[in-house]
Image (cartoon, rainbow, N blue to C red):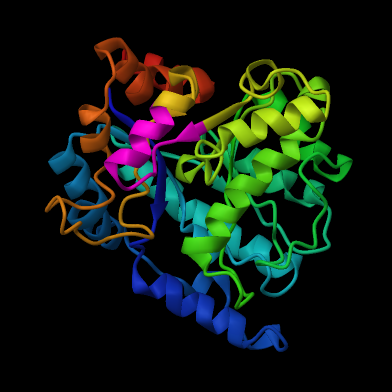
Amino acid sequence: MIIDIHGHYTTAPKALEDWRKRQVDNLATPELGPKVSELQISDDELIDTIESNQLRLMKQRGADLTIFSPRASFMAHHIGDFNTSATWAAICNELCYRVAQLFPEHFIGAAMLPQSPGVAPASCISELEKCVNDYGFVGINLNPDPSGGHWTSPPLSDKQWYPIYEKMVEYDIPAMIHVSTSCNCAFHTTGAHYLNADTTAFMQCLTSDLFRDFPTLKFVIPHGGGAVPYHWGRFRGLAQELKKPLLKDHLLNNIFFDTCVYHQPGIDLLTRVIPVDNVLFASEMIGAVRGIDPETGHYYDDTKRYIEAAKLTADERQQIYEGNARRVYSRLDAALKAKGK
């Protein structure tokens, strides 16, 4: 199988965006609405948005299954308070669940958490439990900066995050470390904030002993790991100066990278520097970079082409396409085995 671990519902019906606008416009006057019951999206509308977009491209490009979560830039945890985020997260997660129910062979869910600046991450546990227990989701997205580009939260190694980690270990689910919209004009959301956060999350783990406390905790750092593969020597050297173990022992039993890198030299670097066992196939298609590369004539986010062209053995490609995803997302593996796959 070819499993894309990084998909977002970026093509949700416009009614969702309209409902969110009303929610944001009425933050100071929540009694004016909107009510959750006012959002009406039919199965036919969901089917149309998926069949004409994500599923169409999956079939064209040869992908079989996508781990599907709410649109990352729409999480916007900095807006409103915890109740705002809790309501919004529940709506978005339910839509992804409905998509997975309508297309069970092609989509399976990962949860957005109702994070809010200054609110303990433990407040997110009930939504996490619902998504795993009731919806069958196989992972979560964890935002290390719910302030939206101002970085007011403590690092991922801080004990405030531990209740989330304990639940992840209990359920054996990984977290994709994924920020949302930047409201800081110094950081473009997808071109800077996302990649900065990927690099920052890795360094927060490097400088800590988080995985000593949680030896089975699993993080996926998206977008190829930000600057990490390109500066692997710097990170190895910093770990050495900090008297940490070798990175392969210190971090690579717990941290994994996806292939949302949109040119061949980037994928070639990723697969040469990072062990193949730590690389998972992903495209984030219909995401941040949607255009056609004039140098190749193909979509930038058609990442399968880069994997096919990389200097990898057939076994290594199988690991990237399927084997690593099934190992890291154990609940996905169980769901596939239950279907005889």
Task: Indicate left or right for 337 with 264 as reference.
Answer: right
Counting from the top left corner in percent of width and height, residue 253 is at: 63, 18
Q: Is residue 193 magenta?
A: no
Task: Indicate left or right for 279 with 238 as reference.
Answer: left
Task: Indicate left or right for 225 with 316 as reference.
Answer: right
In the rendered picture of this protein, how many numbered marks are placed on residues? 0
What span is colored magenta in the figure?
257-271
Which image quarter is the N terminus in? top left
Q: Is residue 270 magenta?
A: yes
Counting from the top left corner in percent of width and height, residue 156 is at: 76, 43
Counting from the top left corner in percent of width and height, residue 309 is at: 21, 30
Task: Indicate left or right for 154 with 215 as reference.
Answer: right
Nearest the viewer among 116 and 46 is 116
Nearest the viewer among 177 and 311 is 311
Relative vertical location of residue 306 with respect to residue 250 in this rendering, above or below: below
Residue at (39, 14) in percent of width and height: 337
Q: Quadrant of residue 217?
A: top right
Residue at (50, 23) in percent of width and height: 278
Which image quarter is the C terminus in? top left
Q: Quadrant of residue 126?
A: top right
Counting from the top left corner in percent of width and height, residue 155 is at: 79, 47
Nearest the viewer among 177 and 54 is 177
Q: Quadrant of residue 322?
A: top left
Relative vertical location of residue 68 with respect to residue 72 in this rendering, above or below: above
Q: Is residue 66 visible?
A: no
Residue at (66, 66) in percent of width and height: 149
Outermost residue, right side: 159
Relative vertical location of residue 52 with respect to residue 323 in this rendering, above or below: below
Relative vertical location of residue 183 with respect to residue 137 in this rendering, above or below: below
